[in-house]
Amino acid sequence: MVRRRSPIVFLVLLVVLLASDARALRPHVREGWQVGVSYGAAVGDINGTGGETVEFEDGVSPHIRASRMVSRNLAVGLTYAGWMYETGEYPIKHRISMQNLLFGAIWYPGRPDGASGGLCVRAGLGLGWLGLAVVELEEDEEQGHGDRVEYAGLAAELNVSYEFRITDTVAAGLGIGINGTSLDDDVYESGVFYPITANLSWYWD
């Protein structure tokens, strides 16, 4: 458990250290393109069609996004958001994952030259997948993907973050969000995960 969370703690501390060296009121100039990556922790829920809910209190969550500014305060683009969790004891492992591929918008409600300029609100709609796998581990053999089943449906995301401008083109910050998928299946009705991430963004014309 400590090993799984230590990279996340390191990333959060890195963001804090970077932000401490940044000028918080450095103007947030956003023109043209931007690319961002995020990584952090998340919890997840899987809801069955019979009303039962399975809760997972751990997991990691990577995010990748690319967008383009269409106005002073609005960007549109694509986002990948994922959540992965593994449980079980040797030699049987259970792997659960949710992945979203979304088209959406990023809104920057604050003034670019003020402290509120670092606030970001991201929302999107797209496709989502729930993956369930049972993997049997064997000594001296390469680990495979096991018996895996997937369920797909409509996905949505809402994420709120704050970033500090480190240089004229790089920003770092923290974010919190919710990603949900409605599943068209007789067994599973929906899946949702709640990420808390450290974020890095690059801006250029």
Image (spheres, rainbow, N blue to C red):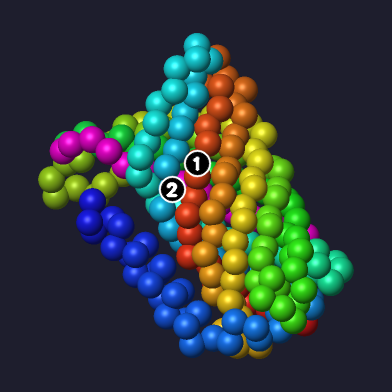
Q: Nearer the viewer, residue 168 or 98?
A: 168
Element marked by disc 2: strand
Residue lying at 86% horizontally and 68% vertically, measured from the top left: 71
The reply to whether callout 1 and callout 2 are in contact (CB within 8 Å) is yes
Give the magenta-colored segment's residue range.
75-90
Residue lying at 57% horizontally and 44% vertically, measured from the top left: 178
Residue lying at 56% horizontally and 27% vertically, measured from the top left: 190
Residue lying at 67% horizontally and 34% vertically, measured from the top left: 154
Residue 205 vertical placement versus 135 (above, below): below
User: Which x, y percent locates residue 185?
Assistant: 57, 20
User: Which x, y percent locates residue 41?
Assistant: 41, 53
- Identify residue type, mark 1: Phe
Q: Main secondary structure of the magenta part?
A: strand
Disc 2 crowd rating (10 Å Cα; few below 14, some 14-19, many 20+) is many
Circle 2 is placed at which residue position? 42
Q: Earlier in the sequence, mark 1 or mark 2?
A: 2
Check residue 193 in the rendering and tell me which mark sits there, or answer none. 1
Visible residue check, residue 117: yes
* The stretch drawn in magenta includes residue 85: yes
Q: Nearer the viewer, residue 122 or 32?
A: 122
